[in-house]
């Protein structure tokens, strides 16, 4: 079956669950820091040259804080940039720099991939575990998708993060592997590619072990599954 292509996860669901704190903005910390500096959200907005409402949404987590903004906020608050990023829920890579790997899609219980209109930062707990898995792949060439499956074969991977690279073709290393594929009709799926021709005809196998013949536009091998 499809799930046998990657080592079965032995962690419990509790240990796989992303904590609600990861990737969240600690609004209280920012408000306390502003108070300590005898400054206001409105003053911060003027410093950033944005509307006060936009600054308020940013501190509430309704608007993503940009990396450039984090540096500017650090100067305004007289705080280390790393501290601002940590309380802003901005994930960092192994060198302490903002990671370029974002959660860009969700995968449902049928293996269907749905792109997120607004990619989200990955929890720091996940960032810290994925670097060994992507060694040599290049941080800027990785896409992350999270499995959301409460039932079915993929329920074993519920909350797991699937890592793969962008492609505009059917990659050779995707054949015979667990892959993220896009069919000619635009549908994207997590499947095992049994075979594929240069003209797009392919045989795929889904999580339910059902085989089908399709026309593929692209296929990218899954690099790793982070429980």
Image: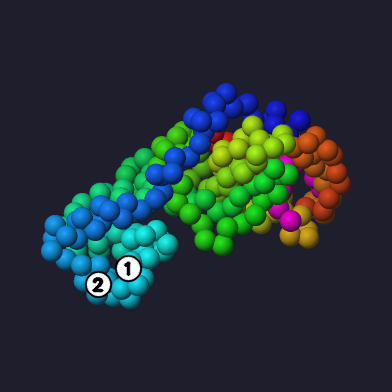
Q: Is residue 193 magenta?
A: yes
Which of the two residues, 7 or 217, is positioned nearer the viewer here?
7
Tell me residue 147's x, y (percent). 61, 43
Tell me residue 50's x, y (percent). 32, 74
State the residue at coordinates (70%, 28%).
4
Q: Is residue 5 left or right of residue 130?
A: right
Q: Is residue 220 left or right of residue 135?
A: right
Asked whether the residues under the numbered discs 2 and 1 touch, taking CB atoms below 8 Å apart as contact, a structural biologist would say yes
Task: Tell me: residue 67, above or below residue 150.
Answer: below
Query: Is the magenta region chiefly helix, strand or loop?
Result: strand
Which of the two residues, 35 or 160, is positioned nearer the viewer here?
35
Q: Residue under circle 2?
A: 42
- The image's colour scheme reads rainbow
Q: Secondary structure at mark 2?
A: helix
Query: Closer to the N terminus: mark 2 or mark 1?
Result: 2
Q: Is residue 85 left or right of residue 197?
A: left
Quarter holding the C terminus? top right
Task: Tell me: residue 213, above or below residue 72.
Answer: above
Asked if one can make out residue 220 in the rendered structure from this viewpoint, the answer is no
Q: Is residue 206 magenta?
A: no
Q: Residue under circle 1?
A: 55
Tell me residue 66's x, y (percent). 37, 62
Q: Secondary structure at mark 1?
A: helix
- Label 2 crowd bin: few (<14), some (14–19), many (20+), radius 10 Å: some
Q: What is the magenta range?
A: 187-197
- Label 1 crowd bin: few (<14), some (14–19), many (20+), radius 10 Å: many
Tell me residue 63's x, y (percent). 41, 64
Q: Residue furthest top?
A: 10
């Amino acid at each position: 079956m499809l799930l046998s292509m990657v080592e079965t996860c032995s962690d419990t669901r509790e240990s796989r669950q992303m904590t609600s704190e990861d990737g969240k903005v600690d609004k209280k910390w920012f408000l306390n820091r502003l108070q300590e500096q005898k400054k206001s959200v409105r003053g911060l907005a003027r410093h950033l040259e944005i509307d006060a409402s936009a600054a308020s949404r940013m501190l509430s987590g309704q608007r993503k804080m940009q990396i450039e903004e984090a540096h500017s906020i650090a100067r305004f608050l007289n705080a280390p940039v790393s501290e601002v990023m940590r309380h802003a829920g901005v994930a960092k890579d192994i060198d302490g720099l903002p990671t370029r790997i974002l959660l860009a899609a969700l995968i449902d219980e049928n293996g269907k991939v749905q792109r997120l209109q607004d990619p989200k930062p990955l929890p720091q707990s996940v960032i810290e575990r994925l670097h060994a898995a992507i060694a040599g792949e290049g941080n800027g060439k990785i896409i992350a998708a999270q499995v959301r499956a409460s039932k079915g074969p993929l329920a074993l991977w519920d909350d797991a993060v699937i890592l793969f690279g962008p492609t505009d073709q059917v990659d050779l290393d995707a054949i015979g592997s667990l892959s993220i594929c896009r069919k000619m009709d635009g549908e994207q799926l997590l499947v095992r590619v049994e075979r594929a021709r240069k003209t797009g005809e392919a045989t795929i196998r889904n999580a339910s072990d059902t085989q089908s013949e399709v026309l593929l536009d692209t296929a990218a091998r899954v690099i790793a599954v982070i429980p």
